[in-house]
Image (tube, helix red, strand yellow):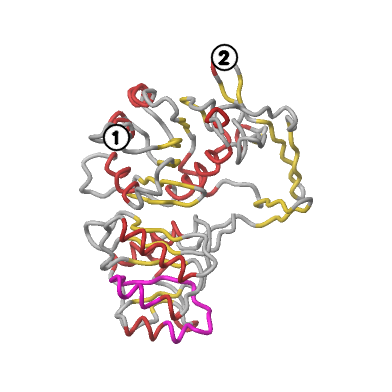
C-alpha cells in the first residue's frame, strides 16, 4: 500500500453543501466548511475516518453560533485535516477547558494518552507539554495535541525538538490551540506534515453546543442531552449527601491535595471512552499530570490492569496517586490499586458490592469517595 493514500484528498462533491436541522421550534442551517489551501484553492476535509471515505465538516450558517466551527488552518500538512484529526482535536479541547491552569491533552483515537497542567513552579508553558507527553510516551506517537493557552516560540521549539539520534522527540500529527504567535508559526512550518489549527473562543468551549448530541444507527437517529458533570469545583466533592451513602465512605479520609487531584482525574475520566479509569498524581512532584489512562474496556479490572501496566512502563511512581473510575467498582478492582500505592479512589458507587468494596479499601488503607454520578462516554 502506498503512503500516498494518506495524503490524497477524497472528493466530497457527493455530500450536500447545506444541512438544515430543526429542534422543536429552532431551525439551524449548516454550511460545508472549507479553508484556504494551496494557491488560493478552497479545501475541505482530506477524508473521513479512513482514506476511502469522503467526509465534510458542517458549521452553523450564523457566525455567532459557530465556536468550534470557526477553526482556522494556520498550516497545512498532508493536504489538510482528516475526520480523525478533527475528532481528536475536539475531544482534546473539551479536556483542557475544564482547567483554569494552562493545560495540554495528548489524544489518540478519542482517548487521552496524557494530560498535564501548569503550576507555580514551572519556568515556561513548554513544561506542560512535557508533562502531558510523559503520561504514556509510546502511545502518544502520532497524536493530536490540544492546548488551552497560546503557543509561543518557546512551546513551538519544544514541539519540533529532536532526540540525540536526530528523530522527532514529539511526533505530533496536529495541533489545536487558541492562538499562535508569528514566531511560533515560523518555527512550526519546519515540520512538513504537521497541521496547525487555531480555535477561537476556547474559554466558552464546554458550554456551547447543540441542544442534543446526535448518533446515527443505520437509518435511525438517537438524540441525547450533551454530557456535563456537576463536579466543577473542589467544594462539589465535599457537599455530597452522606445520608445516601455518598461522599467519603471509608475509614481513611483524603487530604485536600488528594481531592484536588481526584477532581482533575474526574474531568479527564468523563472525556474519554468508557469503560475505564484515570490515574492522577497525588504527590508534590506529579500532582499536575495524569500518570495513566485505561479506556474502552469491557471489564473494569482490565482497564485497571492496562493503566497500571502503562504507568509501570513509563516509570511512574503511583504512591499517593488518585484513581477515578467512570462506573461503579467491584471487589477485584481494589487490591491491585492498593498494591500500587493508590491513596484515593473516586467512583459513582451504586453496586450491590459497595459494602465489600468499602471493606477492601479499608483493608488497603485507601480513602474512597462515592459521587452518585456516572461518567460513561460511548462515542
Residue found 52% across the figure and 38% down from its top: 85
Is residue 156 part of the magenta span, yes or no? no
- Name the outermost residue toward the top: 39
Residue span colored magenta: 334-357
Vertical relation: 81 (above or below) 294:
above
Q: Can the viewer see residue 58?
A: no
The residue nearer to you, when weighing 239 against 142, is 142
Image quadrant occupied by the N terminus? top right
Horizontal and vertical percent position of residue 253: 31, 77
The residue nearer to you, when weighing 83 against 51, is 51
Vertical relation: 123 (above or below) 9:
below
Q: Which mark is residue 158?
A: 1
How packed is label 1: few (under 14 Cα within 10 Å), some, or many (20 or more)?
some
Residue 262's image quarter?
A: bottom left
Residue found 65% across the figure and 29% down from its top: 10
Tell me the residue that label 2 is attached to.
40
Amino acid at each position: 500500500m502506498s503512503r500516498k493514500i494518506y495524503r490524497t484528498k477524497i472528493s466530497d462533491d457527493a455530500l450536500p453543501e447545506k444541512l438544515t436541522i430543526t429542534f422543536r421550534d429552532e431551525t439551524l442551517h449548516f454550511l460545508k466548511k472549507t479553508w484556504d489551501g494551496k494557491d488560493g484553492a478552497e479545501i475541505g476535509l482530506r477524508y473521513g475516518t479512513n482514506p476511502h471515505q469522503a467526509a465534510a465538516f458542517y458549521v452553523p450558517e450564523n457566525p455567532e453560533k459557530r465556536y468550534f466551527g470557526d477553526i482556522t488552518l494556520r498550516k497545512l500538512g498532508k493536504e489538510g485535516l482528516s475526520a480523525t484529526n478533527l475528532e481528536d482535536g475536539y475531544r482534546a479541547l473539551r479536556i483542557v477547558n475544564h482547567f483554569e491552569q494552562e493545560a495540554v491533552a495528548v489524544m489518540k483515537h478519542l482517548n487521552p494518552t496524557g494530560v498535564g497542567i501548569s503550576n507555580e513552579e514551572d519556568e515556561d508553558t513548554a513544561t506542560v507539554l512535557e508533562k502531558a507527553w510523559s503520561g504514556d510516551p509510546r502511545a502518544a506517537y502520532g497524536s493530536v495535541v490540544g492546548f488551552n493557552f497560546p503557543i509561543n516560540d518557546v512551546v513551538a521549539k519544544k514541539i519540533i525538538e529532536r532526540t540525540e539520534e536526530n528523530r522527532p522527540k514529539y511526533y505530533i500529527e496536529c495541533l489545536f490551540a487558541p492562538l499562535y504567535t508569528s514566531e511560533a508559526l515560523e518555527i512550526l512550518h519546519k515540520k512538513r506534515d504537521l497541521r496547525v489549527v487555531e480555535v477561537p473562543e476556547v474559554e466558552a468551549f464546554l458550554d456551547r453546543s447543540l441542544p442534543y448530541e446526535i448518533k446515527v444507527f443505520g437509518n435511525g437517529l438517537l438524540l441525547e442531552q450533551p454530557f456535563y458533570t456537576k463536579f466543577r469545583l473542589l467544594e462539589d466533592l465535599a457537599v455530597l449527601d452522606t445520608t445516601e451513602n455518598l461522599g467519603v465512605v471509608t475509614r481513611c479520609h483524603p487530604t485536600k491535595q488528594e481531592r484536588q487531584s481526584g477532581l482533575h482525574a474526574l474531568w479527564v475520566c468523563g472525556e474519554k471512552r468508557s469503560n475505564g479509569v484515570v490515574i492522577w498524581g497525588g504527590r508534590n512532584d506529579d500532582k499536575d499530570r495524569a500518570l495513566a489512562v485505561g479506556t474502552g474496556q469491557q471489564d473494569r479490572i482490565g482497564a485497571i490492569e492496562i493503566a497500571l501496566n502503562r504507568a509501570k512502563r513509563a516509570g511512574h511512581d503511583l504512591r499517593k496517586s488518585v484513581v477515578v473510575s467512570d462506573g461503579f467498582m467491584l471487589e477485584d478492582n481494589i487490591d491491585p490499586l492498593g498494591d500500587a500505592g493508590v491513596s484515593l479512589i473516586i467512583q459513582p458507587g451504586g453496586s450491590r458490592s459497595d459494602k465489600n468494596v468499602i471493606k477492601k479499601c479499608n483493608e488497603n488503607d485507601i480513602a474512597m469517595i462515592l459521587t452518585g454520578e456516572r461518567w460513561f462516554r460511548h462515542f
